[in-house]
Image: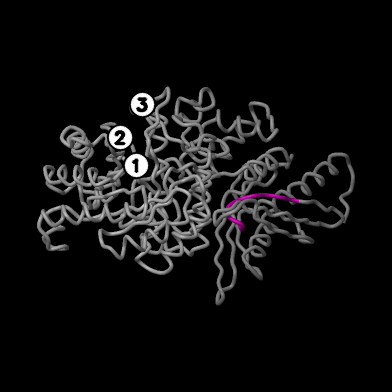
Amino acid sequence: MERQTQGDGEKVYIFDTTLRDGEQAPGCSMMVEEKVHVARQLERLGVDVIEAGFPIASLGDFESVREVSRAVTEPIVAGLARCVEADIERAGEAVQEARKPRIHVFLATSEIHRRYKLKKARGEILRLAVEGVERALGLCRDVEFSPEDASRTEPEFLCEVVEAVIEAGAGTVNIPDTVGYAMPWQFGELIQRLRAEVSNIRKAVISVHCHNDLGLAVANSLEAVRMGARQVECTINGLGERAGNCSLEEAVMAMRTRQDVFGVYTDIDTREIMNASRLVSSVTGMTVQRNKAVVGENAFAHEAGVHQDGMLKEKSTYEIMRPEDVGVEKTSLVLGKHSGRHAFRKRLEELGIRLDEGRLEHLFQEFKHLADKKKEVFDEDLEALVRDELEQVPDIFRLASFHVSSGSSAVPTATVQMTVGGELVTDAATGDGPIDAIYRTIDRITGLQCNLSDYGIRAVTKGKDALGEVSLTVQAGALRERGRATSTDILEASARAYLAAVNRIAKRRENGAARGEEAEE
């Protein structure tokens, strides 16, 4: 693989192993067609290498590697193989139709693996590694070698193995932190030592493959890049064995965002990152956590009032990446209980709503009250609050509190407290159901005999904590009025909507009496 340079430093090659190591995560198995679909998205993303599978592992893996080899043209397509003749031949057969084929051979080199897994001495490991590379070169001109568990291998022996496989013809040597054991400074020092002590190291690209058992996969990979590694092996959404692999999106965006630190570039079209993340999540069923860096739902969302205020003045105050650079449409200023007046006013303006300061302040307090009940306040919630604010409802009777007792084997009973003429009045009544009991109690307090002629309910927004809107029509004699109210508690919305209609009826009667008119009955 020829190194490339440009004005902003050397290129770091992106080796994506979502289809191989990512698929090894429990529950993440993919069908051949799904792998091809993901591979095409990885090609759009601009990855340099797609490790499509482990051909000897199963017929399905073999078919996957072969079909991916046929489906993409720009990336290198790699098949994984142990340093075993049958593995290597199977991998060579699987990638033979690829426009740019690669065989990736590996062999464990650490003392713990040599003693307990392979039961082989250093000399035999060295011989098998060289033979594996040479055998792979007989089938494919592009060969990568990985000394498995490199980070726990004796450094002097690791240097010996790396020098031998490069001499045998490996164009890429991958240094895996197979069990996520390394600390960033240790891993960086290891890369530095290989560059200093392996005489032919500049004939090959140094790659790294880090696992996330201690949450350090991205940190270790980035430190390796800082120390001279020029290929990063990673997966979309950080999928992989156990706690996963280095996350492609995090590593790429770190190198891009902190180009001043790393001085390198990749050929990744970062605008395709979110598409890749969503596709892999959909295909594997592995949901991305909300607070996941770069691609999580909260990655470009702000709720705190201080943050929102800063964002509205200058986005760089709280965002180091632009959402559109990773394929996210825009920053989300989430309205919740931590939001401030600035964000609240801005969102209303975006909805085309402009209110005077008095109404705006009252509405802001209503919004805060609602936000204490809901995790997130949506645009539809705001519009409903505005409708409540703008509707001129007389305030003759005001709901203070209510309590309802109901059940399949109990008589529905409602106790209601209301303010009437400045005094707090309490009463109770039973009904056919909890809402009927509330309405009968309200009638007892107001002294109005009202009939409910129409009642409707709808969810204003999504979710279990959705705001519910009740619309109804109440008739008292010849007077007929509509009422509407919203709340996360549908019983409260029902009570407030009923009172809105009752207040209008009471006001009309009051106005009629003031003009000397007889109330119509």
Q: Are marks 2 and 1 in contact (CB under 8 Å)?
A: yes
Q: Is residue 435 above or below residue 417?
A: below
User: Looking at the picture, how far across and down is residue 127, in whole percent?
Assistant: 16, 54
Q: Say which amino acid is labelled 1.
A: Val
The residues colored magenta run 483-491
User: Looking at the picture, how far across and down is residue 396, in whole percent?
Assistant: 70, 44
Give whichever of 427, 263 is nearer the camera: 263
User: Looking at the picture, how far across and down is residue 353, in whole percent?
Assistant: 69, 33
Q: Is 94 included in the stretch rendered in magenta? A: no
> In the rendered image, which quarter is residue 317 located in?
top left
Report how far apart the C-alphas of labels 2 and 1 lie in the structure: 8 Å
Q: Which mark is residue 263?
A: 3
Label 2 residue SS = helix
Label 1 residue SS = strand
Q: Is residue 308 visible?
A: yes
Q: Say which amino acid is labelled 3.
A: Gly
Neighbor class of circle 2 (other Cα within 10 Å; few <14, some 14-19, many 20+) is many
Neighbor class of circle 3 (other Cα within 10 Å; few <14, some 14-19, many 20+) is some
Neighbor class of circle 1 (other Cα within 10 Å; few <14, some 14-19, many 20+) is many
Which of the two discs, 1 and 3, labels the residue nearer the N terminus?
A: 1
